[in-house]
Amino acid sequence: MQTLQQQRAAHALQCVKAYADTHTDKKEHSEYKSYAAALPAMIHMNGLGQAAAFFKSKGGTHQALYTLLSDWLCAKDKPFSTYDDLLVGITHADMQTYRLAQAEAQALMDWVKKFAKAYLRKDKEN
């Protein structure tokens, strides 16, 4: 049985590698790394709801990170498991569940940042 931290890491790795496999452009990789690094600070400053709404509204690379978060937070045994979309969960859950989801999002994004840095290319030879 895996720990929650291992499950987070596995989900983050799967999503980052899938993004790397389907998006080969150096600019997209750079954007993903940058947005993944910025999202935790945005969550901390503005809250999970505001950050999620912003990322969903932007589309593109932002949408990929929104989907990553939504898939995790709406999965079985996660804070918004009774909802099929992150924003629906955010707008319907109680404050305790929201805070739990926000902390969970921060923990997941820590892994996403690390894996994005490791797996997304920086230059032509990577």
Image (cartoon, rainbow, N blue to C red):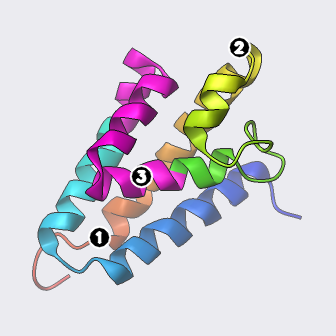
| As drawn, 79 above or below 109 | above
Inter-mark Cα distance, 3 to 2: 23 Å
| Residue type, label 1 | Leu
Tell me which residue sits at (56%, 46%) in the image: 108
> Mark 3 against mark 1, which lies toward the viewer?
3
Q: Quadrant of residue 89?
A: top right
Residue 95's tag is 2
Q: Which residue does the numbered mark 1 point to in the structure image?
A: 120
State whether residue 113 appears in this view: no
Give yes or no for contact between labels 2 and 1 (Cβ–Cβ under 8 Å).
no
> Mark 2 against mark 1, which lies toward the viewer?
2
The percent coordinates of residue 58 (x first, y second) are 27, 44
Quadrant of the drawing holding the C terminus:
bottom left
| Residue type, label 3 | Leu
Q: Which residue does the numbered mark 3 point to in the structure image?
A: 65
- Is residue 13 covered in magenta? no
| Residue type, label 2 | Met
- Looking at the image, is mark 3 or mark 2 earlier in the sequence? 3
Quadrant of the drawing holding the N terminus:
bottom right
| As drawn, 75 above or below 101 | below
In the structure shown, which secondary structural element does the residue marked by tag 2 occupy?
helix
* Number of other residues with Cα within 10 Å of mark 1, as a class: few under 14, some 14 to 19, many 20 or more: many
Q: Is residue 44 left or right of residue 5?
A: left
- Looking at the image, is mark 3 or mark 1 earlier in the sequence? 3
